[in-house]
Image (spheres, rainbow, N blue to C red):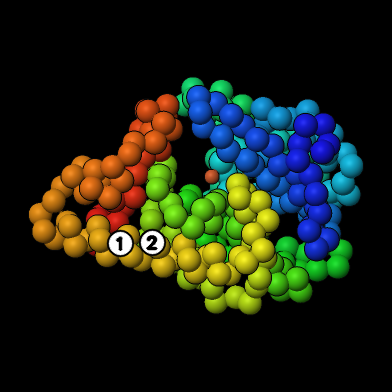
Amino acid sequence: MVGGLITGKHEGVVYAGCTIKLFGTRLNTYVYVTDGLLVDTGPSRYNREYANFFRTQPVKQVVLTHFHEDHSGNAPWLEKQGIAVYVHPAAVNVCRKPARLPFYRFIFWGAREKFNPLPVGNTLKTKHKVLQVLEVPGHSPDHIALYDPAEGAIFTGDLFVTPKTRIVMRPENIPQIMQSLRVLLRYDFQTVYCGHAGVVDEGKKMIQMKLDYLENLRGEVLELYNRGLSIKVINKKLFPKTAPLTYLSGKEWASEHIIRSIIEDS
Ligand SMILES: [Fe+2]
């Protein structure tokens, strides 16, 4: 533990996580340090705790898997310490303005102030390694993963999270997520460093499990849709329980978005 964060080390990668609890919803969020590279920065609600953790680490550069505030919240603080922050080129302008968050997200994660990141290239060099930057959109349009061939590991941000996705945010695109999972599976790796699930030892197996689950789900959704059922009815059939986060977020998070994105893509 460092100042309220859960910290540890796995095969040379140091991690730090916080747990956010609100209205019965509980979510862990992890950042990782590998060879002086910090992957994601955690939410600003825990700025003091993360700043204390960062001070214990030899952070030379930062990369964000995507622009969301739980990953970018402490990037402005790191930038003020003179550390370069990299994001997908599509997110550079987004990060130059303070995030306009719905109230529940502001309470949950804290604000994300503006900062000036640099566009990431195809690779990221650290002192001893070269990490490959993989474009894996779907959770967000700017989402990247970092592949470390020497360690057989991938930092996956929010691409994995859980093998059985039951709820997503409105702009998420399930067919695109499936395609991004297929991209990951082309690489040789064992460990997944996930933004919310933490260190996943049998990472490749779990990524395959998620892809299988989504492929089955896609088949079911399209079969029901072709029988003439509406998105609402399909949603009730496949996801009869409404998650508390759906109410809390005013439907920004909902299982219905899974169904809709599958149908729209077909
Ligand atoms: Fe995210």
Q: Is residue 61 visible?
A: no
Pointer 2: what residue?
214
- What amino acid type is highlighted by mark number 2? Leu
Counting from the top left corner in percent of width and height, residue 4 is at 77, 32
The mark tally for this picture is 2
Tell me the distance, in whole angstroms, between the alpha carbons under discs 2 and 1: 6 Å
Kindly identify the residue that appears in the image at 80 percent across and 49 percent down. 8
Q: Is residue 202 above or below residue 158?
A: below
Counting from the top left corner in percent of width and height, residue 94 is at 55, 40
Pointer 1: what residue?
218
- What amino acid type is highlighted by mark number 1? Arg
How packed is label 2: few (under 14 Cα within 10 Å), some, or many (20 or more)? many
User: Secondary structure beneath disc 2?
Assistant: helix
Q: Quadrant of the N terminus?
A: top right
Q: Is residue 188 left or right of residue 174?
A: right
Ligand 1 image-quadrant field: top right
Query: 224 or 156: which is nearer to us?
Result: 224
Q: Is residue 221 above or below residue 105?
A: below
User: Secondary structure beneath disc 1?
Assistant: helix
- Label 2 close to label 1 by CB (< 8 Å): yes
Q: Quadrant of the C terminus?
A: bottom left
Query: 90 or 37: which is nearer to us?
Result: 37
Kindly identify the residue that appears in the image at 27 percent across and 65 percent down. 219
Kindly identify the residue that appears in the image at 50 percent across and 24 percent down. 23
Asked if ligand 1 lies within 8 A of label 1, the reply is: no
Q: Is residue 58 above or below residue 94?
A: below
Label drawn at residue 146: none
* The furthest residue to the left: 228
